[in-house]
């Protein structure tokens, strides 16, 4: 998965696991993983008059890959299920939830800088200076800071 994600990121895609299954000793099941390429951007309603019930859907390309293990080793074979691709390539992955997540060392930097009362915009600029491929947005930094504050606070509410 790391190799597939690294290569797809260099090409301007984000690979996600849509479905997977492990056999675990059952004869009727087979181990597989189904990969899809996720688009960047907001969900667009096709009919503006209709109210949508689900607003947190993700957009996917029709191009899909299926992976199956070969033998008892750790090698896998990838097969293209739908090989057509008819969209323009994305040149920027800014704002994508998977790509913009903070790595563990970046999260440690965020916590240290937050304890030193550094402004969030300066934290974001420092993260981008340390990693030129960082596409984290300020909203993702706010979310990471909120998650840290909530983990420190524990089950108590803010007033307590």
Image (cartoon, rainbow, N blue to C red):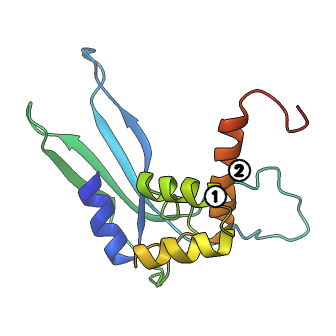
- Name which quarter of the figure residue 49 lies in: bottom right
Q: Residue at x 41, y 74 (%)?
A: 130
Q: Secondary structure at mark 2?
A: helix
Q: Can the viewer see residue 49 in this picture?
A: yes
Q: Position of residue 107 (x, y in %)?
A: 51, 54
Along the line of sight, the residue nearer the viewer: 27 or 98: 98
Q: Which residue is mark 1?
A: 114
Q: Which residue is mark 2?
A: 146
Total residue callouts? 2
Q: Position of residue 10 (x, y in %)?
A: 32, 75
Along the line of sight, the residue nearer the viewer: 132 or 93: 132
Q: Please, is residue 158 above or below residue 93 in the view?
A: above
- Name which quarter of the figure residue 151 lies in: top right
**Quadrant where the C terminus lies?**
top right
Q: Secondary structure at mark 1?
A: helix
Q: Residue at x 69, y 66 (%)?
A: 43
> Neighbour class for label 1 at 10 Å: few (<14), some, many (≥20)?
some
With 48 as the anchor, is 132 left or right in this view? left
């Amino acid at each position: 998965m790391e190799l597939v994600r690294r290569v797809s990121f260099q090409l301007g895609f984000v690979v996600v696991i849509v479905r997977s299954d492990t056999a675990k000793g059952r004869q009727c099941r087979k181990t597989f993983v189904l990969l899809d390429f996720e688009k960047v951007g907001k969900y667009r309603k096709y009919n503006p008059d209709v109210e949508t019930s689900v607003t947190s859907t993700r957009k996917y390309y029709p191009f899909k890959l299926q992976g199956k293990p070969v033998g008892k080793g750790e090698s896998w074979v990838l097969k293209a299920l739908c090989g057509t691709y008819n969209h323009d390539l994305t040149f920027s992955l800014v704002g994508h939830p998977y790509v913009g997540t903070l790595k563990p060392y970046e999260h440690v930097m965020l916590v240290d800088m937050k304890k030193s009362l550094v402004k969030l915009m300066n934290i974001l600029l420092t993260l981008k200076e340390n990693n030129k491929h960082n596409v984290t947005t300020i909203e993702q930094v706010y979310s990471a800071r909120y998650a840290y504050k909530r983990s420190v606070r524990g089950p108590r509410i803010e007033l307590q």
